[in-house]
Amino acid sequence: MALDQPTHTQTEFGSLPDWDLSALYSAPDAPEFARDMDWLDQECKAFAADYEGKLASLNADAMLDCVHRYEKIDMVAGRIMSYAGLRYYQNTVDPSRAKFMSDAQDRVTVATTPLVFFTLEMNRIEDAAFEALLDANADLARFRTLFQRMRAMRPHQLSDELERFLHDQSTVGAAAWNRLFDETMAGLEFVVEGEDEPMGLEATLNLLTDPDRTRREAGARALAEVFSSNIKLFARVHNTLAKDKEIEDRWRKMPDPQTSRHLANHVEPEVVEALRNAVVAAYPRLSHRYYALKAKWLGLEKLEIWDRNAPLPMEAPRKIGWDEARDTVMDAFTGFSPQLADLTEPFFTQGWIDAAVKPGKAPGAFAHPTVTDAHPFVMLNYLGKPRDVMTLAHELGHGVHQRLAAGQGELLASTPLTLAETASVFGEMLTFRKLLDKASSPTERKVLLAGKVEDMINTVVRQIAFYDFECKLHAARREGEMTPEDINALWMSVQAESLGPVFDFMEGYETFWSYIPHFVHSPFYVYAYAFGDGLVNALYAAYEAAPEGFQDKYFAMLKAGGSKHHKELLAPFGLDASDPAFWDKGLAMIEGFIDELEAMED
């Protein structure tokens, strides 16, 4: 039996940890995996036999028992799919891993089909009867927010038969197109001028931050060439997924393509609209102004797209070893609270991080919460850049949030996306402030400030531009099939507006929408990043203004997971995201950093 052994990968940045997935299962052929699969088959059938057609007649105690059984099923299914998914992300081009994940997904989908009745029947219970159940049992009332989210879908619910059909059909619908996208991306090779060997996506994207402008351009042109040669496939993926969503939205009577995401996030459309409008109105004060400064620093009249994330000429290029990256983040977290550092430590010591770039490994970075009776896993593609240190801080922030929220149990731990970025962006801010305090010269401070502004622009301006692109794409798809050229034009319309007049765009850049995974995996997810950044900027301002007792309130917010609405979670800090002026506070912090950079020019 082949075990997934805890290991390290030796790199130029030191010994980088690999995942030890044994907290989930010891191996794909572990008897526990087969046992859980069998249990899931039997328990889902037993649950349906015990409760289908009877939910409305349950008293509060019986309803609580029902919810606990449902939660256990959710946990076992989550454990199975977390394990299969994480193994797949380690090597997405390994056919055996892809087959293992696909087979697991098929079997879990079939096993859980009998559960479709649960949400439908819960939502048919009248409001007064439902409130009486919650009033009768405090333990059941703990799930109030979950039920509110569930019942928000009442107007959009289909018949039991249709809901079962959609559930069954999911593995060959959107999920199949997701896999096609992932496997295509993982298998792409980029021939970069001046490089001896073809490169993968992650390494080629990394060239866009190279100090050498020639290498940056070579990387950008290689990306454009490969994206362009595959653009028909990517257009097919996006056309199909957008149409799939439009059909389901139409059947569910969703007023617009964004509604389902807002409902899932438990956030009001007008709050997202206020965020979007505040950011778009701030483009000239933020990205346009900053990139004009950057062009001046680089000695250029115009910036090309390969200059957007270029290091500054006054920045001494250096690679940051893994040990230094870990110490930097841990020092920053300890400075805020020893408890935060204690919660972070096991990620480094227990095989909870997979850090090295490896052939076939999924690109990007994430923190996967898995299930509440295990622990999260962080994935990175660490290449020793200063931004990689910030990414480490970001994903560890997620991981700590997921650990703290686990106390809520499987059904309440998951945080709506609007608040899911809070701890991650806060972790980045702590790390940045620590580095800024240690800056030994005005030049070092300038480099740090510029790096943070660029990260914030990428998190706020770029993600809202992404959101606008998705809104335009889904609206256009409702009018008919889109050619690759149609999608390219939508992409360029938001890029020019958000980045500003200092940019020229090379031929081929119009295809760069094609590699953004969020458009494929999580439509309209991207505004959560801007939401999180604006929220954290306001939170950090509150921390600086009144540090006494802030940590306790902060940890209480993270522990709440998805058990409370954002209004309730932010109230102890005197913040309200539904106030349009709220977003201007967050954007003012970015503006203040740019003011300081401009003042350094005088």
Image: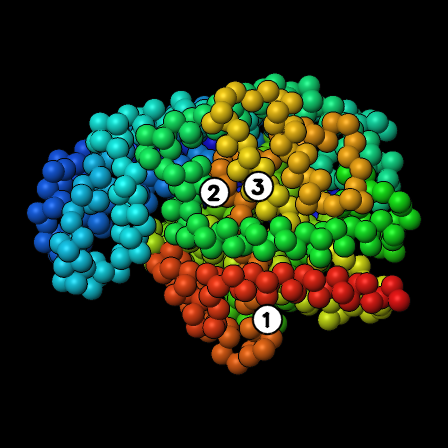
As helix, strand or loop, the secondary structure at mark 2 comes to: helix
In the rendered structure, which amino acid carries the disc numbered 1?
Ala
State the residue at coordinates (59%, 66%): 585
Q: Nearer the viewer, residue 303 or 105?
A: 303
Position of 558 compared to 529: left or right? left
Q: Looking at the image, is mark 1 or mark 3 earlier in the sequence?
A: 3
As helix, strand or loop, the secondary structure at mark 3 comes to: helix
Position of 422 compared to 143: left or right? right
- Where does the image place residue 72, in percent across and percent down from the top left? 27, 46
Residue 8, picture quadrant:
top right
State whether residue 83 appears in this view: no
Position of 281 compared to 369: left or right? right
Q: Nearer the viewer, mark 1 or mark 3?
A: 3
State the residue at coordinates (55%, 50%): 276
Task: Name the residue beneath numbered marker 3.
Answer: 468
Inter-mark Cα distance, 2 to 3:
38 Å
Task: Name the residue beneath numbered marker 2.
Answer: 21
- Where does the image place residue 28, in percent across and percent down from the top left? 42, 32
* Furthest residue in direction right, as rendered: 299
In the rendered structure, which amino acid carries the disc numbered 2?
Leu
Task: Name the residue beneath numbered marker 1.
Answer: 541
